């Protein structure tokens, strides 16, 4: 039987709380970095969805371990994660809007004006481009590098 998807290698019941925090956060951040890289190669709604899930996992795990790390460096990264979560949500919202419009057109035989469809596509491109830039910046940010260094101590 395969290991559960939430299982994190290296954790055991004998590990200290801090050691467990380091293992968990390192795993979550490594996964996030890998998924962001995948998204930047293929900006599909599926890869966006996996990035959004990973951002949530990093953020909520960070909230659990807030007291264990340098507050200033911790909060810088936390705020970046929160910002990325908001931006991925905005891109996801436009994807859902497009899906719903297609559904209305098909099921309810509603004609959506070309001007509206064009505006939605323009907004989607704008948001997607901004998100890609933010995600690239995040991967290369000093805040991320500083926090990863903390996890290696």
Image (cartoon, grey):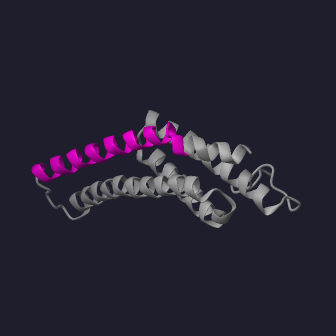
As drawn, the residue found furthest toward the right would be 14
Count of numbered badges drawn on the protein: 0
Magenta residue span: 114-143
Q: Is residue 121 magenta?
A: yes
Q: Main secondary structure of the magenta part?
A: helix
Tell me the residue at 44%/38% (across/down).
Answer: 136
Tell me the residue at 33%/44% (across/down).
Answer: 130
Task: State left or right for residue 30 relative to residue 113.
Answer: right
Return the x and y of residue 111 as percentages of the image width and height. 13, 57
Tell me the residue at 55%/44% (across/down).
Answer: 144
User: Which of the image's four quarters has the C terminus?
Assistant: top right
Return the x and y of residue 119 as percentages of the image width and height. 16, 49
As drawn, the residue found furthest toward the top would be 41
Return the x and y of residue 147 as percentages of the image width and height. 61, 47
> Which of the pair 134/34 is nearer the observer?
134
> Which of the pair 149/20 is nearer the observer?
149
Return the x and y of residue 28 as percentages of the image width and height. 63, 51
> Which of the pair 41/99 is nearer the observer?
41
Q: Is residue 113 magenta?
A: no
> Which of the pair 128/120 is nearer the observer?
128
Asked where in the image residue 33 lies, by quadrant, the reply is top right
In the depicted structure, whether residue 118 falls above or below residue 61: above
Tell me the residue at 58%/63% (across/down).
Answer: 60
Task: State left or right for residue 132 relative to residue 52.
Answer: left
């Amino acid at each position: 039987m395969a290991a559960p998807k939430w299982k994190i290698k290296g954790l055991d019941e004998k590990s200290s709380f801090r050691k467990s925090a380091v293992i968990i956060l390192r795993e979550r951040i490594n996964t996030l970095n890998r998924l962001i890289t995948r998204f930047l190669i293929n900006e599909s709604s599926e890869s966006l969805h996996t990035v959004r899930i990973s951002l949530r996992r990093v953020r909520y795990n960070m909230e659990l371990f807030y007291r264990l790390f340098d507050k200033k460096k911790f909060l810088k990264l936390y705020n970046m994660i929160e910002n990325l979560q908001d931006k991925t949500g905005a891109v996801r919202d436009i994807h859902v809007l497009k899906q719903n419009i297609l559904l209305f057109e098909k099921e309810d035989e509603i004609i959506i004006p070309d001007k509206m469809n064009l505006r939605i596509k323009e907004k989607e491109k704008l948001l997607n481009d901004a998100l890609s830039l933010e995600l690239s910046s995040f991967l290369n940010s000093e805040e991320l590098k500083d926090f990863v260094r903390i996890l290696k101590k």
